[in-house]
Image: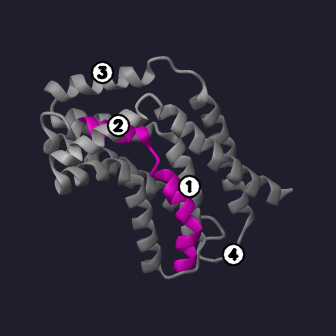
Amino acid sequence: MWDLLWTVAPLALASAITPTLFALQVLVVSGPSPRTQGRAVILGAGGVFVLLFALVLGGLSQLPDAGTGQTSTAEYVIEGVCGLVLVAVAIWLLRPHPRADARMEEKVKGYAAHASPWMFVGLAAYMTATDFSSFLVLIPALHDVTSSSVAMLEKAVVVGLLLLFAMLPVLAPPLAVQLAGERGVRMLRRTYAAVMGHQLEVMGAVALIVGAVLLYRGFVALI
C-alpha cells in the first residue's frame, strides 16, 4: 500500500490546490451563519466528489489492467489525454479574466446574507462539478488504484485519502475556526486576501505543471 500511496501522493496534493472552493468556504465561515452554511458547502462538494469517484472507479475497474499491478498502455493513454486537456485548461485559466474573482466574491457575499443552506449546497456542487482541473488530476491517481494489485481494503484506504485531499479546501476553513475561534477567522481572512485576485492564476499554474508532467509521461512512453 505504501508504494501506491507514494505514487498517488503528488496528484493528491495537486488536487487539494483549489482556491475557488477555499475562497467560497472562507467567505462562508467568516459570515453570519458559519456552521450551517459551512456544512452545506461540505455536503455539496463532497456529494460531487463521491459521485465522481464512484463513476471513475467503476469505469476504470473494467479495464484489462485492473488489479494486475502492471504498467499498461491504458495508463499511458489516460496520463497523456489528461495531461493534454490539463495544459489546454491551464492556457485558458492563465488568460486575463477581468473581475472574475471580484464577481464571485460579490455573489457569495450576497448569498451569505440571506440564502438558505441548500443554496450553498448547490453552489458548492456547481463549483466542484465545473472544476475540471481537479478532476483531470484525480483520474490518473484513481487509475493507479484500480490497476494496483494490493488488497481491496488497502485500495479503499488510498481512495479515502484521495477524497480527503480533494476536500481539504472546504474542510480546512471550518476546522481552523473550530480550533482557533476568532483567531482562526482572522488567519483565514489574511490567507483569503493573499490568494484573492490570483485564484485562476494559481489553478492555471498547477494545471500547467501537472499537465506537462502527465503529457510527458503518457505520450513519451507511447512513442
Q: Nearer the viewer, mark 2 or mark 1?
A: 2
* Mark 4 lies on residue: 70
Check whether the beta carbons of the residues at disc 2 and disc 1 lie within 8 A of each other. no
Q: Nearer the viewer, mark 2 or mark 3?
A: 2
Calculate the distance from the C-alpha at mark 2 to the C-alpha at mark 1. Answer: 28 Å
In the image, what residue type sits under mark 3? Glu
Calculate the distance from the C-alpha at mark 1 to the C-alpha at mark 4. Answer: 17 Å
* Upstream in sequence: badge 1 or badge 4: 4
Residue 150 appearing in the image: yes
* Mark 1 lies on residue: 139
* Upstream in sequence: badge 4 or badge 2: 4
Identify the image quadrant of residue 68.
bottom right
* Of residues 6 and 40, the one drawn nearer to the viewer in this rendering: 6
* Mark 3 lies on residue: 106
Is 71 magenta? The answer is no
Q: Residue at x 24, y 52 (%)?
A: 176
Q: Considering only vertical position in the picture, is 65 above or below 176?
A: below
Residue farthest toward the right in the current orientation of the protein: 223
Identify the image quadrant of residue 108.
top left
